[in-house]
Image: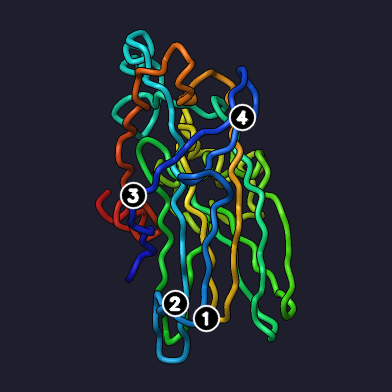
Amino acid sequence: MRTIGTVVGALAIALVATGCLDEQRYVTPEGGGAWALAIDEDTPAFFEAEDDSVYLIEQRIPIEFRQPTEEELAELGDLEGVEIPYAQRPWLERGDIELQLDWTLSNLSEDPVTVTLVVNGFNEFHEYNPGIEVVDDELVIDFAQWERTYRLEPMSRRHGTVREEELDEVAVDLASVVNMAPNPNQIVYFENQSSHDRRSQMYIPDVVPALTGVRVGLRSLSNSPVVLELTLRVRDNRDVLYDGDPQSEDADEQPWEAPVPVLFGPADAVGAMDEM
């Protein structure tokens, strides 16, 4: 089984605009503006089967955070009465930040095209990594943590938003699948909400890590030219974002060096269950 990888490259992230606690701030690429990625005629197939090819292009967008204080680090070792699938508490927990994605899809072709917008999250420990395989001569694509499929008319555009509560669900689902939920595709399917799905609730750990970033992509069964432009907004509820403003009192500090998350997907969940 071949799993979905990430775009490799050194990406400089800038948090622009100053503001106070709870203000939304943008995460932008170096130089500012929107993030942009595209499928076109030169995009190689990511996965090839006998009758189908899957084209996939992704952009990984990490968020920069300030350094944790000594007091905050000391609290991470306190696991009394807490059941979590990690060696320590996450420094960044659900609710510390809230994320929103605004996106625009543009069909640059003179023909209609169908494309899927996909979003997967990562935290301090894990990054969700759905896979693609062929089962009984049928192409099977694991669900992304958030995905929607759109048909775009020739030379048309479409706009939308992945709301804060939807990306909060991404954070909860990631923690749940890592916590040995037996069917990740059922957990992450966008119509199954953990707030009222009993199959999910029993696997939600006591502490859910906050997302430290997202991986956004385009997936299609054709390489007709489609462009995705997007912006990521972060609401800082705990004063944890890195302030790169040279006039700030923390100007000499470097952003927190977040741990490299381990890729985790449906195949990993099956393997973990087999080892039990």
Q: Position of residue 41 (x, y in %)?
A: 49, 82
The structure residue drawn at horizontal position 45% and vertical position 26%, both measured from the top left corner, is: 244
Q: Is residue 198 visible?
A: no
Query: Which amino acid does the dot numbered 3 rest on?
Result: Ala
Relative to 159, is 13 on the left or the right? left
The structure residue drawn at horizontal position 47% and vertical position 83%, both measured from the top left corner, is: 138
Mark 2 or mark 1: name the one nearer the start of the chain. Answer: 2
Residue for badge 3: 10
Mark 3 or mark 4: name the one nearer the start of the chain. Answer: 3
Residue for badge 2: 43
Residue for badge 1: 223
Q: Nearer the viewer, residue 172 or 219?
A: 219
Circle 4 — which element?
Answer: strand
Q: Nearer the viewer, residue 51 or 183?
A: 51
Distance from disc 3 to disc 4, alpha carbons, whole Å, reads 25 Å
Relative to 254, is 28 on the left or the right? right
Q: Residues within 10 Å of mark 1 (few under 14, many from 20)?
A: many
Up-down relation of residue 148 to residue 54 (above or below): above
For discs 3 and 4, the disc positioned in front in the rendered view? 3
Circle 2 — which element?
Answer: loop
Colour basis: rainbow
Distance from disc 2 to disc 1, alpha carbons, whole Å, reads 7 Å
Mark 2 or mark 3: name the one nearer the start of the chain. Answer: 3
